[in-house]
Image (cartoon, rainbow, N blue to C red):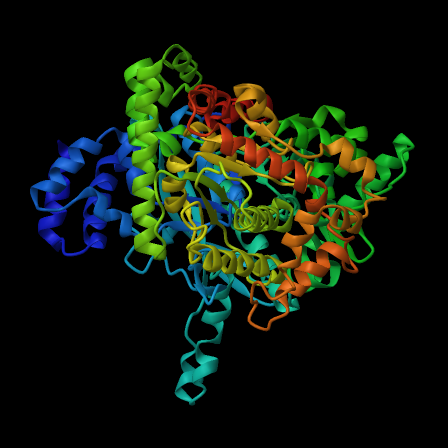
């Protein structure tokens, strides 16, 4: 009961008048309890081989409930809070730690949770952005961004360690990188690892002589320039200034992290040559500047370049998250020279080392250049230096080998691994869906919390009574979600509707527009008296568009216009509802995945690297309505394709037609498709005079200078998609459909991030 006593102490000391007060009291009590073990675990981790995870994003979500669950003290804390008249659920009003944009950052969060649960020494490094991705609201259907000041009510889960600050030097300025440490508590608190996030601060924050002479703006200019570096995740890079700031961010956190790792080693009496006992995982290309920075730091200590670079080849591993070559980061050499001039000589030496190696092997340079055409190619730098390169789903890795990184695979086949993504069941089932968690534990025990494969035992518990209880739990979750959406969005959903959910970052390749067109087509058919047996369905979207992504914002506006029209139509709104939830984040996702009946995973085959939202919805008993893409393939393998709804062209089919595809032929040949697409321009929906909908229409039928018409094959897959949706609709509510849902939960075991991290530790990190 030590935690309970500490909570009461902090509550008495500061008072509990708001949810933020309650959150602070509970968090400080837990931090007090774990402090000694946390420090001991950090000291122990430095003794053997260990790993670090560098990522520009850590989408941690709200820490308090996950930490209480992993510490197994939820009931104890609930009782303590209720003794002074509070409710544990009140803390849901506390903002999320939203330092990520989507799957990349959420994956990083799950990996840290799993490593601590498995007792593996893995710490994370990233940036402590002052503002999260952004708060999203809708004004007349348009996305509007606002600052997400996530620490406004305090940040009790972080410890500022000013004494461990380092200096990061740019070509035009020097700044402090000040670390903030967050404990990562494994299940059962057997291990506590650390997420260290860097905040940029000025070396000298106030120019007193300038202020004294009346130059007030100049007096704080240095502070503002420094703090800008860690102000916002992914500043809009449509401008040169935005691009420069992104590059500055990437160097800032990689330099600070490498300096910190070397400082720790020096304090422990270890050599800076760390290839034998340290692995550094680069999560996508954002942290790849760590490679030349490590070489630079070693050279600064007197190590020859050749030895320093050889050591780098033993330290770094690289995770690729995209099959699209155009999405791999590239930096203009002139910008690199201006922002981080100290790295350019190192990069040029690495380029010469590559050219010499290829010459000796009689292999042409091809697309492998690191510094070429006045451009630094970050993926090439990673592939040349890293001792391991991995994709994040079976199909994704095969596409990397065959296409995106084929020249590197031909050169170094032994470096390529597949590490199918995973999710932590502690947050995405135990915390997000306690009713289903209890249902499972009653039948197969609680071993699933650390070994998700034990869910397979549910196959023995799918009788009529079990199915009825499973359905009742799902309905209760749908009711809770409906209540929350009504309160937050002002839209009332009936929990007896099918809840069809598409939640993910807004991007053209994820094809939210295909979903929207299918909804319009369904609406048109209902209005025409077709589909007499259509079961009432609520289509629920959650997504944020990058602020500068005009076309993605147009899709959001279009879906909101569809919702406005359909929800107000008395002829169909008893069978069709649409809602685009605002400010979608981890906490919202927890409610959505627990309530979903249908998981929309409809990217064009060969474009989605893996996905993790598909795993969360599967785990919580939703069927996948999806293409043969990313981890959907492995979901269908695990749960049975007969228990999901797979549609659309496969990768090889799209590759075969890519250069000859004529979108207009599909448009002209399919009256239903044409009728839906035409609503973009025929006045059915209003884009507020922006021309957004016309531009969407043109992108599908005319293309643009940088892509062909309908580059993600919406028209090709439309008819097959519509038929798959109607199969889902016909099956819903039958015993067979309930069994499909239960089979998905029962076979979600391979998608635990515990399994993924175990494979990283065994095959890549050797820890």
Q: Residue at x 51, y 69 (%)?
A: 225
Q: Residue at x 30, y 16 (%)?
A: 465
Q: Residue at x 63, y 53 (%)?
A: 676
Q: Is residue 336 above or below residue 537?
A: below
Q: Note whether residue 301 is visible.
A: no
Q: Note whether residue 92 is visible.
A: yes
Q: Residue furthest bottom?
A: 214
Image x and y of residue 310, in percent = 70, 34
Q: Is residue 764 left or right of residue 108?
A: right
38 or 583, which lies in front? 583
Residue 196 sits in which quadrant?
top left
626 or 746, which lies in front? 626
353 or 390, which lies in front? 390
Residue 171 sits in which quadrant?
bottom right
Image x and y of residue 679, in percent = 62, 59
426 or 707, which lies in front? 707
Image x and y of residue 569, in percent = 44, 56
Q: Is residue 752 above or below residue 676?
A: above
Q: Is residue 552 above or below residue 218?
A: above
Residue 481 sits in which quadrant?
top left
């Amino acid at each position: 009961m030590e935690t309970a006593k500490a909570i009461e102490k902090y509550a008495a000391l500061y008072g509990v008048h708001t949810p933020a007060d309650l959150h602070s009291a509970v968090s400080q009590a837990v931090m007090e309890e774990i402090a000694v073990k946390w420090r001991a675990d950090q000291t122990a981790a430095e003794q053997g081989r260990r790993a670090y995870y560098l990522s520009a994003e850590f989408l941690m979500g709200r820490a308090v409930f996950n930490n209480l669950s992993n510490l197994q003290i939820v009931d104890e804390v609930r009782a303590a809070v209720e003794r002074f008249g509070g409710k544990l659920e009140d803390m849901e009003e506390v903002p999320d730690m939203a330092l990520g944009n989507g799957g990349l950052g959420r994956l990083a969060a799950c990996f840290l949770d799993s490593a601590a649960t498995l007792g593996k020494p893995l710490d994370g490094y990233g940036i402590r952005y002052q503002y999260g991705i952004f708060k999203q609201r809708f004004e007349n259907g348009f996305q509007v961004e606002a600052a997400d000041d996530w620490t406004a009510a305090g940040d009790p889960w972080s410890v500022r360690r000013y004494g461990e600050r380092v200096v990061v030097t740019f070509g035009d300025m020097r700044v402090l990188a000040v670390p903030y440490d967050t404990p990562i508590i494994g299940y059962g608190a057997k291990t506590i690892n650390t997420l260290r996030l860097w905040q940029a601060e000025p070396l000298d924050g106030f120019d007193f002589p300038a202020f004294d002479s009346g130059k007030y703006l100049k007096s704080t200019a240095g502070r503002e320039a420094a703090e800008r570096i860690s102000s916002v995740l992914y500043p809009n890079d449509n401008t040169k200034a935005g691009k420069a700031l992104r590059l500055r961010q990437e160097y800032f956190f990689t330099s600070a992290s490498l300096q910190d790792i070397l400082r720790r080693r020096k304090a422990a009496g270890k050599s800076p040559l760390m290839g034998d006992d340290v692995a550094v995982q680069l999560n996508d290309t954002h942290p790849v500047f760590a490679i030349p920075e490590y070489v630079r730091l070693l050279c600064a200590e007197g190590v020859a370049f050749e030895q320093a670079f050889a050591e780098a080849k033993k330290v770094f591993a690289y995770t690729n998250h995209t099959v699209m070559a155009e999405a791999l980061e590239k930096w203009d050499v002139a910008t690199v020279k201006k922002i981080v001039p100290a790295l350019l000589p190192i990069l040029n030496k690495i380029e010469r080392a590559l050219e010499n190696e290829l010459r000796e092997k009689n292999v042409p340079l091809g697309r492998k250049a690191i510094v070429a055409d006045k451009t630094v190619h970050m993926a090439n730098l990673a592939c040349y230096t890293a001792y391991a390169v991995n994709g994040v789903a079976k199909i994704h890795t095969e596409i990397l080998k065959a296409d995106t990184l084929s020249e590197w695979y031909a050169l170094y086949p032994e470096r390529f691994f597949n590490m199918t993504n995973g999710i932590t069941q502690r947050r995405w089932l135990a915390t997000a869906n306690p009713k289903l968690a209890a249902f499972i534990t009653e039948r197969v025990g609680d071993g699933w919390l650390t070994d998700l494969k034990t869910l397979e035992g549910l196959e023995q518990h799918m009788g009529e009574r079990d199915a009825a209880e499973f359905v009742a739990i799902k309905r209760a979750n749908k009711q809770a979600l409906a209540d929350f959406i009504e309160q937050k969005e002002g839209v009332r959903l009936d929990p007896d509707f099918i809840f069809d959910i598409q939640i993910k970052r807004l991007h053209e390749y994820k094809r939210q527009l295909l979903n929207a067109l299918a909804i319009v087509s369904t609406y048109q058919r209902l209005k025409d008296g077709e589909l007499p047996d259509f079961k009432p369905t609520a289509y629920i979207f959650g997504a944020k568009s990058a602020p500068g992504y005009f076309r993605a914002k147009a899709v959001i506006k279009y879906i909101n216009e569809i919702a406005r029209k359909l929800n107000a139509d008395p002829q169909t709104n008893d069978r069709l509802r649409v809602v685009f939830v605002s400010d979608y984040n981890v906490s919202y996702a927890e409610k959505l995945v627990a309530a979903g009946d249908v998981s929309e995973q409809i990217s064009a085959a060969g474009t989605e690297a893996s996905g993790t939202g598909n795993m969360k919805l599967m785990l919580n008993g939703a069927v996948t309505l999806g293409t043969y893409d990313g981890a959907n393939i492995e979901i269908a393998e695990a749960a049975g394709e007969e228990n999901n709804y797979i549609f659309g062209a496969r990768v090889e089919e799209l590759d075969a037609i890519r250069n000859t595809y004529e979108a207009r032929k599909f448009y002209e040949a399919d009256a239903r498709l044409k009728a839906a697409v035409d609503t973009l321009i025929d006045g059915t929906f209003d884009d507020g005079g922006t021309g957004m909908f016309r531009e969407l229409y043109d992108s599908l039928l005319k293309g643009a200078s940088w892509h062909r018409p309908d580059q993600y094959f919406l028209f090709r897959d439309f008819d097959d998609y519509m038929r798959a949706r109607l199969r889902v609709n016909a099956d819903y509510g039958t015993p067979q459909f309930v069994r499909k849902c239960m089979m998905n939960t029962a076979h979600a075991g391979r998608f635990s991030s515990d399994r993924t991290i175990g494979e990283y530790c065994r095959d890549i990190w050797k820890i």
